[in-house]
Image (cartoon, helix red, strand yellow):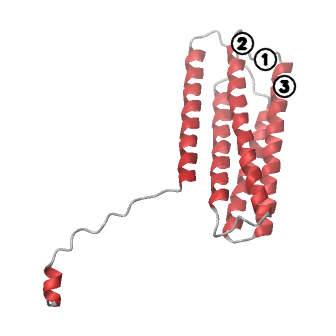
């Protein structure tokens, strides 16, 4: 059979390449979508309840503003950690992820201090003061997610000191960074939402 005959034969369509995603990354994005929907529902509920009236105006504790800056800086160091991992710059990786963890802990402490400030102002989680109760829900649930983020960060921190995070093994640090940046973005949304809708 000549080459010309072979060209005329229909060999069929080439198999379609299937798109694949790391299962851990898929689960993370599924969790992020769920958390986003949860807070979107709560913020919608907040606006509906506020529109009904009988709403106590309040000021957010100043410490919440400072803690926002701390979280943004921690996110910048998390980004630096990922860049260092891609270049196998282990010293920078260990320093950056350690600072991220320290700033995350500082953020959590500052949030707790903010709760103490609310209590001093007689703003409690109770049915009689609906407005302040929403703050406890938003800040408290976000704080629980920050704790989970710190656990993930701790695993990445230990892995960085064991040198098991490197340019050929980036999944753990990428998952950690994605979740941490998400928590940062979520807090920015909540802070500005409460600031402009208090």
Separation of marks 1 and 3 at Cα, in angstroms: 9 Å
Q: Residue furthest front?
A: 1
Give the x, y percent position of residue 79: 69, 58
Q: How far apart, in angstroms, are the residues tagged by discs 3 and 2?
A: 16 Å
Q: Secondary structure at mark 3?
A: helix
The answer to which quarter of the image holds residue 87 is bottom right
Which residue does the numbered mark 2 point to in the structure image? 129
For the residues labelled 2 and 1, the Cα–Cα distance comes to: 7 Å
Residue 93 x, y percent position in the rendering = 76, 64
Residue 103's place in the image compared with 172, above or below, is above
Q: Secondary structure at mark 2?
A: loop
Q: Are marks 2 and 1 in contact (CB under 8 Å)?
A: yes
Give the labeled residue for mark 1: 123
Tell me the residue that label 3 is attached to.
Answer: 117
**Residue at the (56%, 15%) spot, across then down:** 51
Image coords of residue 61 (percent x, y): 79, 28
Question: How would you rate the neighbour count of disc 2 (Cα within 10 Å): few for under 14, some for 14-19, many for 20 or more?
Answer: some
Residue 81: image location, x then y, percent: 72, 61
The answer to whether mark 3 and mark 2 are in CB contact below 8 A is no
The quarter holding residue 165 reads: bottom right
Q: Which residue lies at the image location 59% right of the left edge and 36% below the top edge? A: 35
Q: Earlier in the sequence, mark 3 or mark 2?
A: 3
Q: Which mark is residue 37?
A: none
């Amino acid at each position: 059979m000549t080459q010309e005959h072979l060209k005329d034969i229909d060999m069929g369509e080439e198999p379609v390449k299937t798109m694949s995603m790391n299962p851990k990354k898929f689960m993370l994005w599924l969790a992020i979508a769920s958390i986003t929907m949860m807070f979107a529902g709560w913020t919608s509920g907040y606006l509906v309840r506020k529109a009904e009236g009988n709403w106590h105006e309040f000021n957010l504790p100043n410490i919440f503003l400072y803690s926002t800056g701390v979280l943004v800086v921690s996110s910048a160091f998390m980004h630096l950690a990922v860049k260092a991992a891609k270049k196998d710059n282990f010293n920078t990786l260990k320093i950056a992820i350690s600072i991220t963890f320290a700033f995350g802990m500082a953020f959590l402490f500052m949030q707790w201090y903010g709760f103490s400030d609310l209590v001093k102002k007689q703003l409690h989680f109770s049915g009689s003061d609906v407005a302040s109760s929403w703050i406890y829900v938003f800040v408290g649930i976000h704080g629980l997610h920050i704790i989970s983020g710190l656990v993930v960060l701790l695993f990445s921190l230990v892995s960085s000191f064991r040198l098991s995070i490197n340019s050929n093994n980036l999944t753990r640090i990428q998952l950690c960074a994605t979740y941490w940046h998400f928590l940062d973005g979520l807090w920015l949304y909540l802070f500005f939402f409460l600031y402009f809708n208090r």
